[in-house]
Image (cartoon, grey):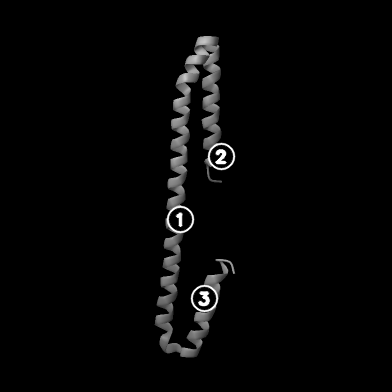
Amino acid sequence: MSTSEMPRDDLAASLAARRELGPDYDAAFADAIAARIEQSAAVRHSAAVADERAERAVALTVLCVTLGVSIPTSAIAAGYAGLSGLVVVWAALVAINVAFALRRRPR
């Protein structure tokens, strides 16, 4: 049974129980359904927050690695190829970061 079917099964069982109990329990039934909806929304929200934090951590890691790599590669490129080597290295670093930023963007 998938996770999307479980709440439907629970709801169907709750509706069957409500029919057996009668209209005197309508308020309690509505409260129980509202509590389940709020709980489900809270779980989804916390998962979305965790995903956002993970994405930020990955983006920060890529930025730090790019900055760390840029110093020695710039020195090597400038030493061997001069300004043209430096331009090529920085163009590559910019391309990597742009590609990463476009890949992470929600569609």
Look at label 3 and name its amino acid: Asp
Q: Where is residue 5 in the image (x, y as percent from the top left)?
A: 57, 70
Residue placed under numbered mark 2 in the picture: 103
- Within 10 Å of the Cα at label 3, are there few (<14), some (14-19), or many (20+) other Cα atoms? few
At x 43%, y 83%, the residue is: 26
Look at label 2 and name its amino acid: Arg
How far apart in space, not on screen, are marks 2 and 1 (Cα)?
Answer: 21 Å
One can see residue 14 in this view: yes
Label located before the other in sequence (2 or 1): 1
Horizontal placement of 23 versus 6: left or right?
A: left
Q: Position of residue 17 (x, y in %)?
A: 49, 85
Q: Where is residue 24 in the image (x, y as percent from the top left)?
A: 41, 89
Circle 3 sits in a helix, a strand or a loop, which is it? Answer: helix
Residue placed under numbered mark 3 in the picture: 10
Label located before the other in sequence (2 or 3): 3
Q: Are marks 2 and 3 in contact (CB under 8 Å)?
A: no
At x 55%, y 12%, the residue is: 84
Q: Is 99 above or below relative to 11?
A: above
Q: Is 57 above or below relative to 28?
A: above
Residue placed under numbered mark 1 in the picture: 47
